[in-house]
Image (cartoon, coloured by chain):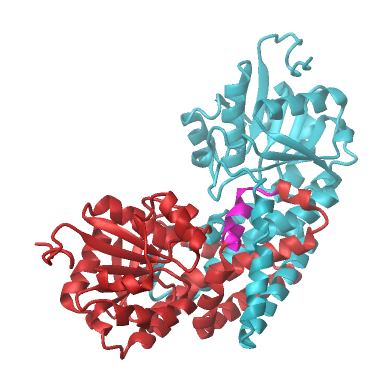
Chain colours: A cyan, B red
Amino acid sequence: MNEEFPGTGSENETKMNVFIIGVGLIGGSFALDIKAAEKQAVISGIDASEDHLEKALELHIIDKKANLDMLGQADVVIVAIPVNAMLQLLPEVLDRVHDNALVMDTGSTKALICETVAHHPKRRNFLATHPVSGTEFSGPEAAHHGLYQHKTNIICEVEKTTFKLQECGLQLFNNLGMRIRYMDPESHDKHIAYVSHLSHISSFMLGKTVMEKEKNERDIFDLAGSGFESTVRLAKSSPAMWTPIFEQNKANVIETLEEYIVNLQQFKKLMLQHNFEAIYNEMESTNKIKDILNGIVTKTS
Amino acid sequence: MNEEFPGTGSENETKMNVFIIGVGLIGGSFALDIKAAEKQAVISGIDASEDHLEKALELHIIDKKANLDMLGQADVVIVAIPVNAMLQLLPEVLDRVHDNALVMDTGSTKALICETVAHHPKRRNFLATHPVSGTEFSGPEAAHHGLYQHKTNIICEVEKTTFKLQECGLQLFNNLGMRIRYMDPESHDKHIAYVSHLSHISSFMLGKTVMEKEKNERDIFDLAGSGFESTVRLAKSSPAMWTPIFEQNKANVIETLEEYIVNLQQFKKLMLQHNFEAIYNEMESTNKIKDILNGIVTKTS
């Protein structure tokens, strides 16, 4: 039933050449899982940082180091780099791959990325994906097996990818245990601003607020419990990764931020009015999120 | 070296009568851990809810059901109820216990509680404590062994408790694996507003913002990853517990909320100005929270 991978059936019967561009948390974890799931896969790594590449080799995340000039050998390319670098590199990657290669991105924004390659002659070789998975850590050391198990992968504009390569991508994600959801890029960016991007800002600003206040009394953090740790966890995230996400999804993120600030101001107003009945009701109605969140699988916290 | 527990040495050589008032997450977990750590402990439970009390008995969290009239038998009383009910009940509990009994609260606020019992004739039988531990769940079913292992217990006005009972309380917390920190009630309330209370508001309002937006598209939550789940986890917390905490710590909480809102507005302003260099710097400097958080033990996430 399953389509075979692009490499199979060519002169090179036994290998699937997978190139991972960006061997950090996301790319490195794909490398590890693909090696485990696809025996014929040979993983080549490309990274702007020679240190990261060395580390990825040392940790057996990749089988060998490579560079952009070697992309003609690739059957599958996964580009897992910050979304600003993505806009520059993705067209070049598509320029370099052969006609049967599958190129996928992993960006947390989708509209601008899809727009950037919309008229590329090899658009049909490209599958736009957003694996909604990760941790607050980054770099090859943060990569680990099973990061994608039971996680959602949002695929955009699937119809713009050639059938055979759609199938290759989906089979790969299925083998990694991912759930697939299809969306258009604009809806993706709008909704993901609420369920991902806003969380990061709320967490960063919470961390900032507390650090500013307690800068002279660092042992105060010693009093914090797991609740605080949970809400500020995302404040450990990489600024290099997140700044371009906020930039590319600026309009949506500003909208979520405005609504969040209005709700906080309203909560403060109720406190100033000493209207704790209303505050109780606010919290009680938000408690409904329990049922909603029951659907979210959180193997990796 | 260790002082013996109050019950020991009396006519009742073999038993330590521990009364837990409020057999939910906090009180119930104390009951379980004390039973495991102190062989001679007999746990009596008191609760406003007969259902909770039945459930606690059924789950072997308590050894027997009791009521306030029986408090004269208590060697140790732990009062683990919402902080508004605490203000009413604590003086009555002190009225009823014998002269060698230790009474401890577990409230997340300390100033008003300490003030309430400041002039009570049995003030020296009281130890004001705040075990910084818990989960977003509540009720006897949420109680579990080991909740307090490696967690911080903030003790206020320790000098106002009689020596022998200070020692009893500290020995009990040591046996449960807790770390002790001493603070005055006002400092406690000020700092805990930053490292605990604000997190809850940020989480509740984040949950509210996203639920309002996505109320007609609930499957959008299906796209959320562990990052979102982490930041809204506290929005599952009990309004009955948290409303009186915000009320009692109103001035401090409003201050933290104001600073948080200012930081969010500043972030939004930078986005509107398209100043992503400044946004990068904001996030990078907040990343320092990594080192600070390394000290927080998060066995129970």
User: Which one is nearer the viewer's eye here, B229 or B99?
Assistant: B99
User: Which one is nearer the viewer's eye here, B68 or B123?
Assistant: B68
The mark total stands at 0
Horizontal side of residue B14 vs B134, given as left or right? left
Q: Quadrant of residue B116?
A: bottom left
Q: Quadrant of residue B161?
A: bottom left
Magenta-tinted stretch = B224-236
* Residue found 31% across the figure and 82% down from its top: B95
Q: From this viewpoint, is residue B114 visible? A: yes
Q: Position of residue A38 (x, y in %)?
A: 63, 20
Q: Position of residue B145 (x, y in %)?
A: 37, 50
Q: Position of residue A189 (x, y in %)?
A: 79, 53
Eyeballing the image, is B7 above or below A114? below
Q: Quadrant of residue B185?
A: bottom left
* Residue found 21% across the figure and 73% down from its top: B166
* Residue found 55% across the figure and 24% down from its top: A63
- Taking the view exactly as shown, the residue that stands out farthest to the front is B69
Q: Is residue B230 magenta?
A: yes
Q: Position of residue B85 (x, y in %)?
A: 47, 77
User: Which one is nearer the viewer's eye here, B123 or B280?
Assistant: B123
Eyeballing the image, is B42 above or below A145? below
- Taking the view exactly as shown, the residue that stands out farthest to the bottom is B119
Horizontal side of residue A139 vs A122, given as left or right? left
Horizontal side of residue A236 vs B86, given as left or right? right
- Taking the view exactly as shown, the residue that stands out farthest to the left is B1
Q: Quadrant of the N terminus of chain A?
A: top right
Q: Is residue B205 magenta?
A: no
User: Which one is nearer the viewer's eye here, B168 or B64?
Assistant: B64
Horizontal side of residue B67 vs B282, given as left or right? left
Eyeballing the image, is B80 above or below B228? below
Q: Main secondary structure of the magenta part?
A: helix
Q: From this viewpoint, is residue B292 visible? A: no
